[in-house]
Image (tube, rainbow, N blue to C red):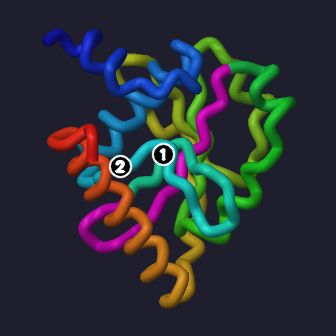
Amino acid sequence: MTIEALELVLSDGRQSPTAANVQRGVCRLLRAHGFAMVTELSIANGRRVDIMAINGAGALWAIEIKSSLADLKADQKWPEYEAFCDRLYFAIPPEMPQEVMPAEPGLIVADRWGAEILRHTEDRPLPAARRKAMTLCFARAAALRLHSIFDPNC
């Protein structure tokens, strides 16, 4: 099976092709920096983070993908993610103007093949109880998704 065919099988249909390409590039970047990722992670406030990443030290980064100016203008829920991560980043495609992005979160530019962090944001360490809850949320989501690959009818 080709990578493109596998991506089609794993796609949930909610993303535009541009957002899917940004997601792929960001995940490649994060993996190269020692992070594991879960996409579309539901969190305790009822929101769904586009990409949640955790590294070996337990640092949690949330990445909100904005695929277009219309997407940015229509969706202003990103501040609600800040209480669930140590760092929050926007990820955008190369053709999107960077100057329209809010200044507080970090900024990543990505395409299908890779990504680059253009602006880091400061660490805002989570309280211990929230970190434990988010780590468990991440681990359960990852384990359940892995199991569903092996037993899709479960």
Pointer 2 residue: 37
Left or right: 24 in relation to 67: left
| Residue 130 in magenta stretch | no
Q: Is residue 152 above or below residue 103?
A: above
Height in image: 119 above or below 95?
A: below
| Pointers 1 and 2 in contact (C-beta within 8 Å) | yes
Residue at (27, 48) in percent of width and height: 154
Q: Nearer the viewer, residue 99 or 55?
A: 55
Magenta residues? 54-67
Q: Is residue 127 left or right of residue 137?
A: right
Quadrant of the image containing the N terminus: top left
Question: Residue 30 at what x, y percent from top left?
Answer: 34, 44
Residue lying furthest right: 73
Would you place residue 26 above or below residue 146 in this image? Answer: above
Q: Residue at x 54, y 42 (%)?
A: 50
Residue tagged 1? 51
Identify residue type, mark 2.
Answer: Met
Task: Name the residue type under label 1.
Answer: Ile
